[in-house]
Amino acid sequence: MLSPVKTIVAAALVFGLGGVLLVAQPFERPSGMPGAATDDPAMAPSFFSGTTNDWNTIAAPVSERHDDGVVDGTGGADTFTWIANDPRIAGTATMVMNETDYRDAATALAPTGEIGVIRAAVLRIVNDGGSWEGPLTWLELADPELVSISGLLTGTDAYEGLSAYVVWSYGTGPGRDLWGHITPEGPPPVPDSLPQ
């Protein structure tokens, strides 16, 4: 005969394993989309890495300072070289940004004491084959110095049908390192629900 403790433990294991199996169900890709590989090298999935350099400001942001010290900036734009080990996504980049800067705000030290900037941007990378374009979200912390940028770009021309997820980060060092993934499939589908 099972003791009450053993019964509770057994029930917890059954429910726990059932939940894991429910969450771990394989997802189905939409029909007509390939699996992890393709016969066309131009459409092949690829993880890539690289960096950026030669930054030039082409438009200063229009800034508005609020009474609490928060500064909103709109329309700042830069151009720079986007270097990647997958030549499909290497090229000349242009980025336009809007930002909310809390670094001088009177309320910035509450509740954690950390300060920074949040930005929304649109990035376009152009090369001889075509272009990539899409929105980015940009988080910048002042101390420790950290910048983390990510977003999903869509290909055009020779890259039509491809998407590229990019992640780009830098801190106190000299590098502005980037990483990403190119695929004709897009990201995997978002799960329908969380476990109850």
Image (tube, rainbow, N blue to C red):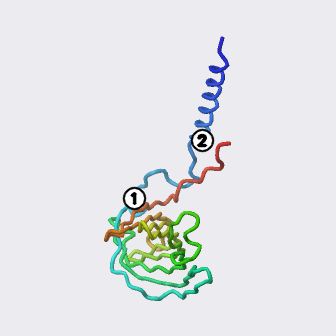
Q: Amino acid at mark 2?
A: Val
Quadrant where the image shows the C terminus? top right
Give yes or no for contact between labels 2 and 1 (Cβ–Cβ under 8 Å).
no
For disc 2, the marked residue is 23
Instruction: Work out whether 182 lies above or below 190.
Output: below
- Residue at 46% across, 74% down: 157
Nearer to us in this view, 68 or 61 = 68
Nearer to us in this view, 165 or 65 = 65
- Residue at 33% across, 80% down: 54
Q: Is residue 24 left or right of residue 78?
A: right
Q: Quadrant of residue 78?
A: bottom left
Q: CA distance from mark 2 to mark 1?
A: 27 Å
- Residue at 43% across, 71% down: 158
Report x, y in % for residue 144.
42, 66
Nearer to us in this view, 173 or 35 = 173
For disc 1, the marked residue is 46
Quadrant where the image shows the N terminus? top right
N-terminal of the two: label 2 or label 1?
A: 2
**Are there few (<14), some (14-19), or many (20+) residues within 10 Å of tag 2?**
some
Q: For residue 152, which numbered disc appears in the image?
A: none
Q: Secondary structure at mark 2?
A: helix
- Residue at 56% across, 51% down: 29
Nearer to us in this view, 159 or 25 = 25
Q: Amino acid at mark 1?
A: Ser
Instruction: Work out whether 177 lies above or below 56.
Output: above
Report x, y in % for residue 15.
64, 31
Which is in the foreground here, disc 2 or disc 1? 2
Instruction: Work out whether 108 lies above or below 20.
Output: below
